Amino acid sequence: MTSFDSSPTLTAWRALLALAVVFVMLATTGWTAVHHQRSADSRTLALASWAKGSIAGRPLPDAGAPPYKLAHFFATLTAAQRGGLADRYPLVVGNLNGAPVTVRYRANRRAIQQARTVEQRRVHDSRLSATGRAEAQHRVERFRSMLGKDRRFLAFDPSGRGLAAEVFGDLDRADRISLVVPGVDTNLLTLERTGSRTNAAPVGMAKSLYAAERAARPGVSTAVIAWADYTAPVGIGMDAALGNLARRGAVRLDALVRALPGPAPVSLFCHSYGSVLCGVAAGRLPGRVEDIAVAGSPGMRADNAGQLHTRAHVWAMRDSGDWIKDVPNLEFGGLGHGADPVDRGFGARVVSAAGAVGHSGYFEPGTESLDNFAAIGVGAYTSVTCAPADSVCDDGVHADTTA
């Protein structure tokens, strides 16, 4: 007779208890949460205005139309008309997959300027609490930074905790495109950092990767996107343990990739919870996605790489000091994200993360983790350094000969 102590149900509950304990531990050792969210949804108002708008006697297209239809619409407009729409409906045009990227850059700069003005008023609004005014001041400072010279945003939405996607390099002429997909606590206030931890934030990650890719293959034109354009979990909690936000983010990621200009191959670099999103998105992404590389992953909501249903090369790395290794790799009743991508049985190509320190150190210059990401991003697969446990991680992967 099977004893109760060895029953599968009890084993599962013990694993869930361990997962809960780890979440409590991580919540008290460095993970932060944003406690004050703003309820105003300015983009919803902008969409309503766009739906009633027209140009040259023609109604404006549905903002949710497929990218190819939106691209055709913008192609029929003059440069002045495109610029006029960007200025009149910045929160819509700046986020339209299918609009020319230069038009989106213009629209988002205008939207950021308008958002800064709103927050400047809130800073002095006596109806707000001290905490509310302090948050407004932080947002003013963030928007001031985002308006810096030569900064270009492919997406921007100040509603709630905020969304954004920044581009480094020439997206229209790139030979290869990389997207950095960050994890929990990603929002406008955490989009970038100053001081010694700049490469732990999405913008710093993307800038670091862009520089490393240019150094790895100077003859290849690259573009890197810091893609903070999905609603990420706040801190370690149920949202971080579930896949709901990853599924919603996967839809947005797929829409963006399908709207990217040109035929350049795309590589995804997915950190922490971002790897959950990339795992969910993998099977739906277009064929131009050639690489999905994950770091510090709690799982990709799959038991093995085959279940991702992608033709892309799947790469994985984890630093030996990354606490994510202590998170139980399981999935039970929707809780947890499945197998560990760095386990040999998963089937990913496991590469070295030597030099990376902790959970947020994978994009630090001088690390093998960043060098490997850069080699993958420019298609220089023979330059990838495999992890000791997977000495043939680059076996069967052909290097890109683009020069």
Image (cartoon, rainbow, N blue to C red):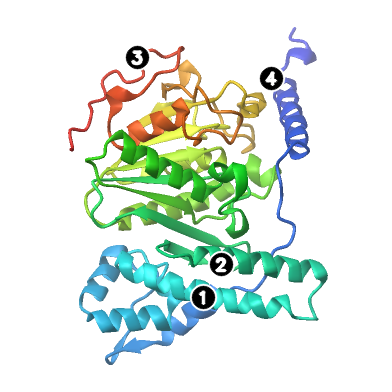
Residue that label 2 marks = 143
User: Is 25 left or right of 188, judged from the image as shown?
Assistant: right
Number of the front mark, 2 or 3: 2
- The crowd level at tag 2 (other Cα within 10 Å; few <14, some 14-19, many 20+) is many
N-terminal of the pair, mark 2 or mark 3, is 2
Image quadrant containing the C terminus: top left
User: Is 36 left or right of 53, judged from the image as shown?
Assistant: right
- Circles 2 and 4: CB distance less than 8 Å? no
- The crowd level at tag 3 (other Cα within 10 Å; few <14, some 14-19, many 20+) is some
Instruction: Name which residue type carries label 2.
Output: Phe
Number of the front mark, 4 or 3: 3
Camera-side residue: 272 or 107? 107
Instruction: Report the Cα–Cα distance between label 2 and label 3.
Output: 45 Å
Residue 8 has which mark?
4
N-terminal of the pair, mark 3 or mark 1, is 1
Residue that label 1 marks = 113
Instruction: Report the Cα–Cα distance between label 3 and label 1.
Output: 50 Å
Instruction: Name which residue type carries label 4.
Output: Pro
